[in-house]
Image (tube, rainbow, N blue to C red):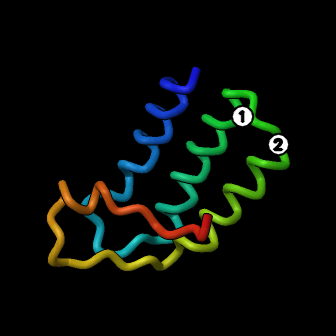
Amino acid sequence: MFDQLSARLTAAVKGFRGKGRITEADVDAVVKEIRTALLDADVALSVVKTFTERIREQAIGLELSSSLNKSYSSRISPDFGW
């Protein structure tokens, strides 16, 4: 179950690769995929809502360095303060 969830979350985040700036539409698409993956994995709805809201708040407008190549930027994750 964890392998499948991990694969789905990784696939969802791949939508951010290679972008200089993350738009609200990009964030909405990724958050939708993350929400679906978590709910399919039977994560509590309250946890899913809180988690996806925090992702959305912190990811909108996040600027990635243009000097980073695609392979390196795929390893960057926003600091969600956890």
Nearer the N terminus, badge 1 or badge 2?
1
Image coordinates of residue 82 in percent, x first then y, are 61, 64
Task: Farthest residue to the top: give it.
Answer: 1
The residue depicted at 57 percent of the width and 59 percent of the height is 28
Tag on residue 63? Answer: none
Task: Determine the residue positioned at 60% across, 70% down.
Answer: 81
Instruction: Give the number of marks.
Output: 2
Q: Amino acid at mark 1?
A: Leu
Q: Residue furthest right?
A: 46
Per the image, label 2 sits on a secondary structure element best described as helix
Badge 2 crowding class, 10 Å Cα cut-off, few under 14, some 14 to 19, many 20 or more, is: few
Examine the image and state in which quarter residue 70 appears: bottom left
Of residue 73 and residue 60, the one placed in the foreground of this image is 73
- Tell me residue 33's x, y (percent): 56, 43
What residue is pinned by disc 2? 45
* Residue 73, image x, y percentages: 26, 62
Q: Tag 1: Cα neighbours inside 10 Å, few (<14), some, or many (≥20)? A: some
Q: From the viewer's side, name the closer residue of 70 and 6.
A: 6
Q: Is residue 36 left or right of residue 72?
A: right
As measured in the structure, the alpha-carbon distance from the residue carrying label 1 to the one carrying label 2 is 7 Å
Farthest front residue in view: 82
Residue name at image x 15 percent, y 64 percent:
69
The residue located at (67%, 66%) in the rendering is 54
- In the image, 20: left or right of 49? left
Q: Are marks 1 and 2 in contact (CB under 8 Å)?
A: yes
Q: Amino acid at mark 2?
A: Leu
Q: Quadrant of the N terminus?
A: top right
Q: Is residue 7 above or below residue 66?
A: above
Q: State the SS at label 1.
A: helix
* Residue 61 as seen in the image, left or right of residue 33: left
For residue 76, above or below residue 48: below
Residue beneath disc 1: 39
